[in-house]
Amino acid sequence: MARTKPSISVLGLGRVGLCFAVCCANRGFHVVGVDVDEEKLDMIGAGKAPFYEPGLQAMLEKAVEKKDLELTASAGEAVARSEVSFITVGTPGRPDGSVDLSQIESACRDVGKALAEKGAWHLVVVRSTVPPGTTGGLIKDVLEISSGLKCGRGFGLCMNPEFLSEGNAIRGILEPDRIVIGEYDKRSGDALQAFYEQFHGNGLSHGLILRTSLINAELIKYASNAFLAMKVSFANMIAHLCQLLPGADVVSIMDGVGLDKRIGRAFLNAGLGWGGSCFPKDLAALLKFAEGLGLQLPLVKATVEVNERQPLLAIELAKKVLGTLEGKRVALLGLAFKPGTDDIRGAVSLKLIEALLAEGADIVAYDPMAMENVKALLGSTISYASSAREALREADCCIIVTEWEEFRTLRPEDFKELMRKPVVIDGRRIFRPKDFEQVVHFLAIGRGPRKLT
Ligand code: UGA
């Protein structure tokens, strides 16, 4: 029977996989989504996104309704019903920095078994972040052994790193800056390029696609994340310096530095440090991987070190004004690792909470999206407010931890009226110091003491 829509499968419906799957459905593909978590499948099948990502919910509802996204727990079924399988399962970090590849190994074993049954060339595309050498090594081996087929002849293999950024995932997939195709052989690369040409249609500009080897594609992902994290840590290092210099301000400095086109302004926003499910895990993995080769990566190491210290700068600032934090009520505005998501993995807020609790502070927190996730993790160790204003009530100090848009609308008078002591620490530089300094005790990351002129 002739099929009208090309069919692909996506194995692993986490933040990357589900967003990618609904975007493919939106761009005219029939998508078979696979996950081992039946509860999650039921939820997605009912058109309900299991996490918050702007734009996802509406697209998911449409894809399910139009039957462009079908779901199954069976990888075999998915491979049989598609021409390309994208693997987007989690590759979590272990405490020592190494990467746990068990999920991807198991997914590839299932795909391999299905390939043995299928009897037609099928393209396997790894989108999960994996250490250099994994796709052409472990993954190829698992696929070959479980299918009994030879890579290149029986099936194709590509490594196609995902560069989407949470909170901006849908746009990142629909309008990417680049598409990196790491290919085992030319046929595999051509097949994946053909998929992207169909996905983007006329929107695929020249130079958007980079074709390279499997290991280079894996390294492009790690090097990109390490470089972005390094930019942030660089800004944070300069921020620390600024805090010792009367009149200095990191925001203005980074505006000046970023005007240089060779540097660029993006990812130079100083704050309380970077978090998330990617930077911390990927930098640790890169360090661990290099260590295995007997190599130190000093810039990556320093990037991590600066980041570990960064949240503590907010506590130092608070102590400068309040002395001890013992028994002081500290309001934390923002818990998600960045705005636009409910994700708290690797979030600075969690490090800050731990350090504040060790100081004996009494914490009240508010976040527009991530509250339930923090409650599930920390329970009643801290208190929760139902709005930013409620969090401020009777607080001795407020720290801006995540730069949600709604916090920008708070006026200095709100802090003055609601707080017991209006000590405001702008950890994400969302307020204009000029507006606040006259009304409250205002301190900000990367801003030196006021000049006595
Ligand atoms: C990051 C990369 O930006 C994506 O390109 C990549 O695909 C993704 O990891 C991944 O590996 O999957 P993400 O973790 O969603 O994306 O978030 P980012 O926007 O990169 O922010 C990471 C952290 O850096 C956040 O905590 C953010 O607050 C912080 N940050 C970012 C700053 O403190 N200052 C900045 O100027 C930029």
Image (cartoon, grey):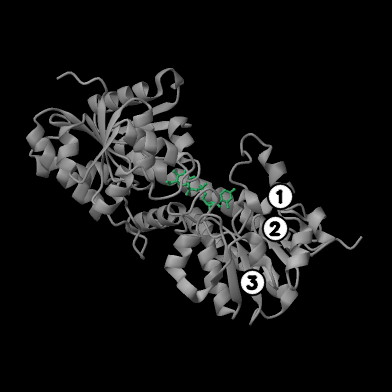
Of marks 3 and 1, which one's residue comes earlier in the chain?
A: 1
Rendered location of residue 385, percent (x, y):
58, 66
Q: Is mark 1 within 8 Å of ligand 1?
A: no
Q: Is 311 displayed left or right of 370 in the figure? A: right
Describe the element under mark 3 as helix, strand or loop: strand
Q: Could you classify mark 1 by the number of other residues whose Cα lies within 10 Å: few (under 14), some (14-19), or many (20 or more)? A: some
| Quarter of image, res 450 | bottom right
User: Circle 1 is placed at which residue position?
Assistant: 251
| Residue type beneath disc 1 | Val
Number of the label disc, if any, that sits on residue 330 = 3
- Please tell me which residue is depicted at 50% across the width and 46% down the height of the picture: 227
Q: Nearer the viewer, residue 270 or 114?
A: 114
Q: Are marks 2 and 1 in contact (CB under 8 Å)?
A: yes
| Front tag of 3 and 1 | 3
| Residue type beneath disc 2 | Gly
Residue 181 visible from this viewpoint:
no
Q: Is mark 2 within 8 Å of ligand 1?
A: no
Rendered location of residue 344, percent (x, y):
47, 58
- Please tell me which residue is depicted at 47% across the width and 43% down the height of the picture: 165
17 w.r.t. 406: above or below? above
In the rendered image, which quarter contains the N terminus? top left
**Circle count:** 3
User: Circle 2 is placed at which residue position?
Assistant: 446
Q: Is 3 displayed left or right of 302 in the figure? A: left
Residue 109 visible from this viewpoint:
yes
Q: Could you classify mark 3 by the number of other residues whose Cα lies within 10 Å: few (under 14), some (14-19), or many (20 or more)? A: many
Q: Nearer the viewer, residue 144 or 439?
A: 439
